[in-house]
Image: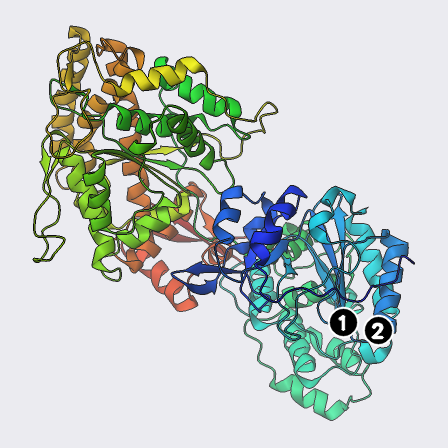
Amino acid sequence: MAATEVLAPKTMPMSIQFMARYGEALLDAGYRILPIQPGTKKPGMMRQGQWFDYPQWSRHGMRETTAYELDVWATWPDAAIGVATGNVIAIDIDVPDEALAKGIQTLAFERLGVTNAIRIGRAPKRLLLYQADIPFAGFKRQPIEVLGLGQQFVAYGIHPDTGAPYQWPMDDLSELALSALPAINETQARRFLDEAYGSLPPSFKPKTLALSLDEAQRSNAVVSSQVVSTQSLRGTVKAISSALLHLPNDDLDYDSWVRMGLAIKGALNGEGYPIFMAWSAQSQKHDELTSQTTWEGLRPARIGAGTIYKLARERGWVPDESLALCGDDQSLHPAKAFIDRITAEPAFVRDELPDLPPAKPLPKGWDQVGGVLGAMMALMTKTAKRPQPVLALGASLCALGAIMGRKYRTKTNARSNLYIVGIAESGAGKNHSRSVITQLFTQANLLPLMGGNKIASGSGLIAAVQRQPSVLFQLDEFGMFLAAAADRKRSPRYLTEIVDQLTELYTSSGSVHFGIEYASGAARDVQKVVHQPCVCVYGTTTPLHFWQALQAANVSDGSLARFMVLRSEEDFPNANPAFGDVIAPGSLIADLQRMNQGAAKHANLCGMLNASELAPNPYVVPASSAAQAVFDLLEAEIVQELRAAKQSGYASILARIEENAQKLALIRAVSNDSDDPIIEEADALWAVALTRHCAEQTIREVSERVSENATESLHKRALKLLRDAGDAGMRRSEFCRKTQFMELRQRDALIQALVESGQIELTSKQTVGRPTVWLRALT
């Protein structure tokens, strides 16, 4: 078969579940995939049986797809598969003429290498795949486009126009490793695109300059040095003239002609008139009087040099590095750095929320635990592709808490029930610790202690605890779960009851939980109480989802205070070359089983069946005098801190430090010796340091993240941006760019409110051109 020949499309069943069939093979082949809404080309997410847009899909181009994500997506009916470009480059030949499309494909084979990864959607149009030497942003010259970072294409799904599946007529992509594709770089791709575009007949070249108003505003926002306006979008005559050489007026349509006139006038004001007239005269439709009248009537407001530079850059313009581009502030914008910004930044769909406050380091020795706890953490870090020891600690504490539940307590009646949230970015390896816990519980015959992977309602939670009063819930996407469960205004009651019940179960661990009182019904006539429930929850989530989910009420009502929040020290650590199968040492399995029996040699009821209707008699773990002194000192300190924090709203978080410290010390002591545990001074010091760290970080992050309402949330986000900028502050133009999640009117009102309240100040700084406006936080 000739290299340029494309086979007839293969037939495929229309009912195929694309994600379930091809997803795993694509991941193994090295591709980064994402879900596509059925019958479309749009990334999507399914929630409660309905498809929604996926605004942050471009993140998938910057990281590997996780096995957990694939497992979730495979359950979404008819989900199509998209491939995020970046490490893979796609040449999209959107040409409806078969001979011409094949000719461009042949040219690609000659210039870039022969690839067998050819996708057909609506023939004769086609898409060719290559491997990127170094990932780069895409560019286009209609009707040919090079897809790169921040973009995607549909690999498997139903084409919206043909109603038939996409085809791979040569090699199926799921059977073709990314490493087998010909490798190319940006320079090669640009040269090919220029040559391919030059080979197109005039009738196939577009008669429009396709740049939307939103794209134009984003391009010009990079140029601006103050609030976006005509004056701040200035270019230079030399730069505009150079860029226009790549934007010929080949009988463009009227809208494109007017848009270019607006951009030229916005960039050069009166100096742009002769340039616009000369550019307009390139078209056979040019009429001098019409062009002159139109120019005089143009009133550009949010369009200027950035639009022209971006359009020209997409069509191959590479300005000389010495060329000044910005008329207002030439010294600050050398050509190369400036062009890199206006062409690279709009390529991504970014989350405009600022990062979390920099975390304080965990207390020294936080990972020096020993015993069963240390053995579990070591197993998790040894077998993980991306070791996350902080998350391993959180998962292990909750797992041991459930095993110890109703079998051990302190003399103050503190129990081992814990709620811990492990926070790390997507793709950082959050699911490995949970997976290891499941395997350990399986090997140790402890699976009855594990609850479901999801909690659907408050009554469902109570039913699970009634079946198994000492239970471990491991919840992924905890932030999304919390967002629904904590939203009392919009979520149904059966969801909001989950938070209420978790709060009550935490408090009643040393007594009796009576559950929810319902109206009389066949299955609910008899109330079932649970004696000394021990519910442990280990949830994992991303920082964005967790802090967005919380509301001010969660702080004041104490529901947040019951959760210890552990943040990974490094989201994307180096890959562990020795990662692999989880094979637990026999000694660890034996220790877990022994712990499940409780302090068996002591006379108590720990060995009885784990029945909710029976009240157990847990073994009281003593504390050494040195350990007790640590707790006594902590209690005195907390009382003083509570008095000082009475009006701050954070008293509930401070109030739980002592209780959580007792719980952690108890678990560590039993981890070291489940037969004759004693809480030693080292256990107490370690527990106090860790719980204080978690509480302090939670208070700090809540103060910057959690708001009473949407307006306060915007104020906090804006203030954090300015605080992070330091004493120097930031230009208003940069502030506008980083707050694109606000509308213009919202931003202006916010700035005015923050100035009037004395939280920020505006200053003017003289530059080479005219003065620029800077914003600086005062608090």
Residue 698 percent location from the top left of the image: 30, 37
Q: Please report the residue visible at 41 percent of the width from the left and 17 percent of the height from the top.
A: 375
| Quadrant including the N terminus | bottom right
Q: Please report the residue visible at 75 percent of the width from the left and 42 percent of the height from the top.
A: 179
Q: Please report the residue visible at 8 percent of the width from the left and 46 percent of the height from the top.
A: 527
Residue 88 as seen in the image, left or right of residue 8: left
The answer to whether the residues at label 1 and label 2 have Cβ atoms under 8 Å apart is yes
Compared to residue 226, the image places residue 726 above or below, namely above
Q: CA distance from mark 1 to mark 2?
A: 8 Å
Compared to residue 52, the image places residue 373 above or below, namely above
Mark 2 falls on what kind of element? helix
The colour scheme used to paint the residues is rainbow
Residue 270 as seen in the image, left or right of residue 422: right
Q: Nearer the viewer, residue 520 or 758?
A: 520
Q: Is residue 555 visible?
A: no
Category of crowding for the residue at label 1, using alpha-carbon neighbours closer than 10 angstroms: few (below 14), some (14–19), many (at least 20): some
Q: Amino acid at mark 2?
A: Glu
Residue 363 percent location from the top left of the image: 35, 21
Q: Please report the residue visible at 13 percent of the width from the left and 12 percent of the height from the top.
A: 603
Residue 621 as seen in the image, left or right of residue 54: left
Q: Which residue is mark 1?
A: 123
| Quadrant including the C terminus | top left
Q: Amino acid at mark 1?
A: Ala
Q: Which residue is mark 2?
A: 98
Residue 767 as seen in the image, left or right of residue 100: left
Residue 141 percent location from the top left of the image: 76, 67
Q: Which mark is residue 372?
A: none
Category of crowding for the residue at label 2, using alpha-carbon neighbours closer than 10 angstroms: few (below 14), some (14–19), many (at least 20): few
